[in-house]
Amino acid sequence: MIKSELIQRISEQNPHLYQRDVENIVNAILGEIIAAMARGDRVELRGLGAFSVKKRSKRNPAGKLRIVEPEKGPTSVSRSQIKRAVKEHAARTDK
């Protein structure tokens, strides 16, 4: 699902809200998550997951040598509820 699909689905579930208002809300939430991660803060959304920025070392795939210069990159930890829901959905659709 992409952001525009998320906005569309939320708009359909909440017909009392204008789509532009839903888009502003989604953009505000995502903007706050990104800003927090840019500050180096950890963001935890109960039932969804935790997001943080972690220092990672680069490596040379050919020589498998670690390069000293660290790179910062986002990481996320999914909660077991999401994993379980995805597995259950996949099991239902496979039948």
Image: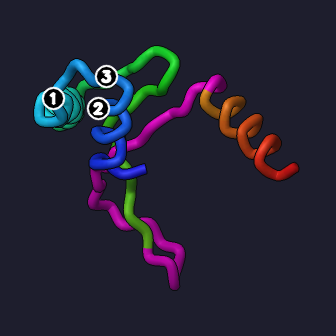
Q: Position of residue 29 (x, y in %)?
A: 21, 27
Q: Position of residue 90 (x, y in %)?
A: 74, 45
Query: How far apart in space, not on screen, are marks 2 and 1 (Cα)?
Result: 7 Å
Query: How far apart in space, not on screen, are marks 2 and 3 (Cα)?
Result: 5 Å
Residue positioned 36% across, 51% down in the render: 2
Using the image as rendered, state which of residue 70 and residue 48 is in the foreground. 48
* Mark 2 vs 3: CB contact within 8 A: yes
**Residue at numbered disc 1:** 18
Residue positioned 65% across, 25% down in the render: 80
> For residue 25: magenta?
no
In-image side of 67 versus 29 (left or right): right
> For residue 68: magenta?
yes
In the image, residue 53 sits, relative to residue 14, either above or below, namely below
Mark 1 is on which residue type?
Tyr
Mark 3 is on which residue type?
Asn
Mark 2 is on which residue type?
Ser
Q: Indicate the secondary structure of the residue bearing disc 3.
A: loop
Q: Position of residue 55 (x, y in %)?
A: 34, 45
**Residue at numbered disc 2:** 11
Q: Position of residue 51 (x, y in %)?
A: 38, 32
Which of the marked residues, 2 or 1, is nearer the chain's N terminus?
Answer: 2
**Residue at numbered disc 3:** 14
Using the image as rendered, state which of residue 51 and residue 71 is in the foreground. 51
Disc 2 crowd, CA 10 A, few/some/many (<14, 14-19, 20+)? some
Disc 3 crowd, CA 10 A, few/some/many (<14, 14-19, 20+)? few
Residue positioned 22% across, 32% down in the render: 26
Q: Quadrant of residue 6?
A: top left
Query: How far apart in space, not on screen, are marks 3 and 1 (Cα)?
Result: 9 Å
